[in-house]
Amino acid sequence: MNHALRWQRSTFSGGGEGNTCVELAAISPHLLGLRESDVPGAVLTTTPAPVTELLRAIASGRFTPRRP
């Protein structure tokens, strides 16, 4: 994997040091990389569309458990 990639952490990671983050980097205009900061060598690659839909679903609360 290219170590020159500019990895970005989620703002929900708390900004602290440590390996508790999901990171995202643009590999090319049509390819994104996702990784966990505690395993930086394991990178999942995908196109922007699925990541966009995932972020929209998270923002809409689709994954938030409903309380009885």
Image (cartoon, rainbow, N blue to C red):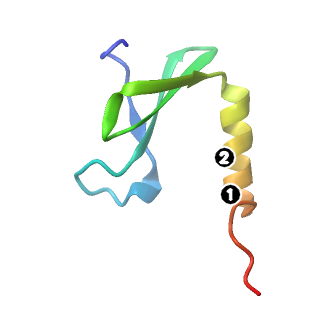
For the point 40% across and 56% down, the residue is 13
Residue 58: quadrant of the picture: bottom right
Percent position of residue 43, x then y: 45, 25
Viewer-closest of 30 and 54: 54
- Look at label 1 and name its amino acid: Ala
Residue found at x 31% / y 41%: 38
Tell me if label 2 and label 1 are in contact, CB under 8 Å: yes
Q: Residues within 10 Å of mark 1 (few under 14, many from 20)?
A: few
In the figure, 64 relative to 34: above or below?
Answer: below
On the rendered image, what quadrant is the N terminus found in? top left
Q: CA distance from mark 2 to mark 1?
A: 6 Å
Residue at which label 1 appears: 59
Amino acid residing under circle 2: Leu
Residue 68 rendering spot, x and y as whole percentages: 77, 87
The residue that mark 2 highlights is 55
Circle on res. 7? none
Structural crowding at the residue carrying mark 2, measured as other residues with C-alpha within 10 Å and reported as few (<14), some (14–19) or many (≥20): few
In the image, is residue 27 above or below residue 44?
above
Residue sitting farthest toward the left: 17
Q: Quadrant of residue 54?
A: top right
Name above or below for residue 62 compared with residue 45.
below
